[in-house]
Image (cartoon, rainbow, N blue to C red):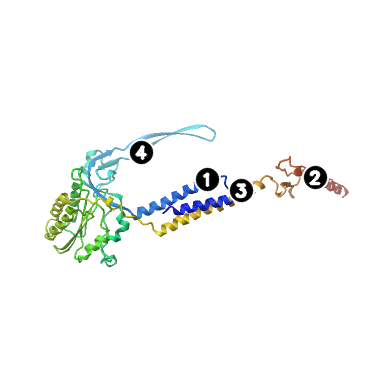
Amino acid sequence: MIFLPTIIAVIILTIVLVSRNETNDLFLNIFVYVLISLFVTLGLYGLFMDTKVNTKEVWSGKIISVNHIEEYNERVTTTHTDSKGKKYTTSRTVHHCAENYIETTDGGEIKVSRSLDGKTRFNDKFPNTDAELEKFYPVNAPTASIHTYQNKVKSSYSIYKHKNINLKEYKDLPKYPKSIKNYIQIDRFLGDINNKDKVIQKLNEVNSDLNTKEKNKQVNLLFVNLKDKPEDYGFALHDYWEGGNKNDFVVCFSSSGNKINWVYTFSWADSEKSEKLKLDVREYMLKTSLNSDFTKVIDDIGKMIEENFERKEFADFNYLNVKTPTWLYIIVILVNIFFIYSLCFADNKSNKHKAHKKKRDKCKLTNVDETNNICKPSKTNEADNICTLDTTNKDYTNYKTSSVNEVTKKKKKRKTKNLTH
């Protein structure tokens, strides 16, 4: 139905052009209009779909290779021709800086200009080899990248949200982590935890391992510590993140000191094994003390995910229809009205103006009788006026003859007066 305004506009355009007998370029005008209208409509609809349906998810992988390209100088010769046709050749030296790349299983080739910790900036002097670059980006190091997919649930999540949760009452919920830092890293643990950098590194490693070609779990494991919040905050986070992405497995919990108060896990995975996994993770976490090494907890849950997680195929949600909003219809209608006016009215005024100007420019004189198509002499310089109209015109020939005679008579009168004086 998004193209309905275009169809109606084409009908209106056809009626207007036919009523004005402008049928010579009828099909051309309609074709141009339809082409422009469809382009604009598809552009607006694509923009809407991008904001309403497309979602970014996190993939995990690892570095498989590094590539250092040494700096070099290139001699560039150019030839140009001046206004007189003479050719000139100039030469200059172009310096190409050193470049460094890493290849990952999830994000492909990535150009890097600094170390992971940001302390070392790469330049022409360092690094100089692949081996030196690999010291900063070790092969098999875990990586993360952002990718876009179509998520129809995003536009229809209201049918899945918790009925008793009003997000306006939960102001301090953490945002979904989707910002890549240092090219290949992302924080998958939100909230406080002992040795957080070490925990995040372990979590990235486990995610990388779960997403190898051999295991291919297509999962993104995240932990969220909401401190001492009540359990309904877990449901609120579920709704705030709109269920998470299709590959997410989120472990949300509350803690007081080293004790875990409650655990809530959520994921779109809904197979029997996946539902059992959610319960098993919950029971395991409730027995965990945050005073212990949390990297072991991540390892253990990673093994449980490897055994039971089955990602939900979002093709199962293709039955959901993305409703086109009223504001998009209004914009499309306004755009079509604008183009209708431009083609039917503004263009007509322009054609009339051009026709009038063309008729006026047939004569270079300053005084033109357009009704009879006759050039009249200028009052300022009658003798030197030159007419450019067709000299075969009878009216023009007669006027030219009489005009010359009158000018001759006026000259004789002036000469006689001068002699008299």
Picture residue at 36% right of the left edge, 35% below the top: 74
To which residue does mark 2 refer? 402
How would you rate the neighbour count of disc 4 (Cα within 10 Å): few for under 14, some for 14-19, many for 20 or more? few
User: Which callout, 2 or 1, points at the residue further toward the start of the chain?
Assistant: 1
To which residue does mark 3 refer? 354
Asked whether residue 181 appears in the rendered view, the answer is no
The residue type indicated by label 1 comes to Phe
User: Which callout, 1 or 4, points at the residue further toward the start of the chain?
Assistant: 1
The residue type indicated by label 3 comes to Lys
Q: Which numbered dot is residue 95? A: 4
Asked whether residue 280 appears in the rendered view, the answer is yes
Numbered disc 4: secondary structure = strand
Numbered disc 1: secondary structure = helix
To which residue does mark 1 refer? 27
Image x and y of residue 139, in percent: 20, 42
Query: Which mark is in front, 2 or 1?
Result: 1
How many numbered marks have been drawn onto this rendered protein structure?
4
